Image (cartoon, rainbow, N blue to C red):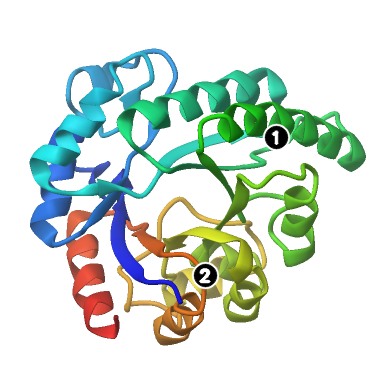
Amino acid sequence: MGKIHLGVNMEFVRHADKSFEWGVEKAAELGYEYVEPMVHWGRELLSEAGYFHSVSMLDDPLRIKRACDKAGVKLSGLSAHAPLCKPEISTEYLKQAIRFAVECGAPLINTDEGPKPHWTTEEEDHVLMRYVLAEAAAVAEARGILIGLECHQQYSKTPTGLDRIYALVDSPVIGINFDTGNSYLGGQDPIPWLEHVKDRLIHLHAKDITVEQSDAERGKVTGTAVGCACGDGVTDWKKVIEICKTCSRDIVFSVECGTIEQAERSVAHLKPLL
């Protein structure tokens, strides 16, 4: 049986106008055991100036490792979302993220199919995704890094659609990063869907959705950037935990919320349930 650990996606500090290192220290202070950093290509002003949490993959990967070691937290993975339907973006991005993960000590990267080109058909999109995933998997297999496919966009918003993407490439490094909030907003019941993918689950985005957001958006969107504090919304966390405890591997719940205060309430709600 798997164990469950609590982590937090670094999105929780994106409105705090602070650096990555500051965010890692704050996560540790709140009681999280793991963090999930977001990485990007190139350089951008806010991160370079220390006002945003994302880390450039042009930086030394040991920057991430040093920050985590100093704060006493571990890495659950890297948020490396790139549109699989757009190989001109995602192929090299994901390959670089995998190599970056090796050096900083992250066991996996998470991604999804992303917004599709406006001119391609569904069949063409799946050929494009197969190309990207095959290229990324070849790099990941040689390095022991996992790739988590998330339910987040037009094709992965249903269990059948996510299964189809997962089956495009037969590789032991490809698994599922299940998002409790995205699956719900897409119009699905997260509980049977999580039960369906639990044998392929490698990571979980612990995202709760308010009743107000549910009433306004459920069935109209394929996901959302961040949710509310865990325990403030519609997610049945006791059932989610019950299912994940039957997994054959340990699972990190990476809380996805939008503020430091929500992250604090989330860890306070989830810890007693574990």
**Residue closer to the observer: 134 or 81:** 134
**Any mark on residue 4, and which?**
none
Residue drawn at x 67%, y 41% as measured from the top left? 113
Observer able to see residue 167: yes
In the picture, which quadrant includes the C terminus?
bottom left
Residue 30 position by quadrant: bottom left
Q: Is residue 2 above or below residue 77?
A: below
Distance from disc 1 to disc 2, alpha carbons, whole Å, reads 24 Å
The structure residue drawn at horizontal position 61% and vertical position 52%, both measured from the top left corner, is 175
Residue type highlighted by circle 1: Leu
**Residue at x 41%, y 32% (from the top left corner):** 101
Tell me which numbered mark, 1 or 2, is placed earlier along the sequence: 1
User: Which element carries disc 2, helix, strand or loop?
Assistant: loop
Picture coordinates of residue 27, whole percent (x, y): 17, 52
Residue 258 vs residue 6, the one in the foreground: 6
Depicted 59 relative to depicted 149: above or below:
above
Residue that numbered label 2 is attached to: 248
Amino acid on which the number 2 mark rests in the picture: Ser
Using the image, determine if residue 49 lies above or below residue 26.
above
| Residue 41: image location, x then y, percent | 44, 19
Q: Secondary structure at mark 1?
A: helix
Residue beneath disc 1: 133
Count of labels in the image: 2
Q: Quadrant of residue 251?
A: bottom left
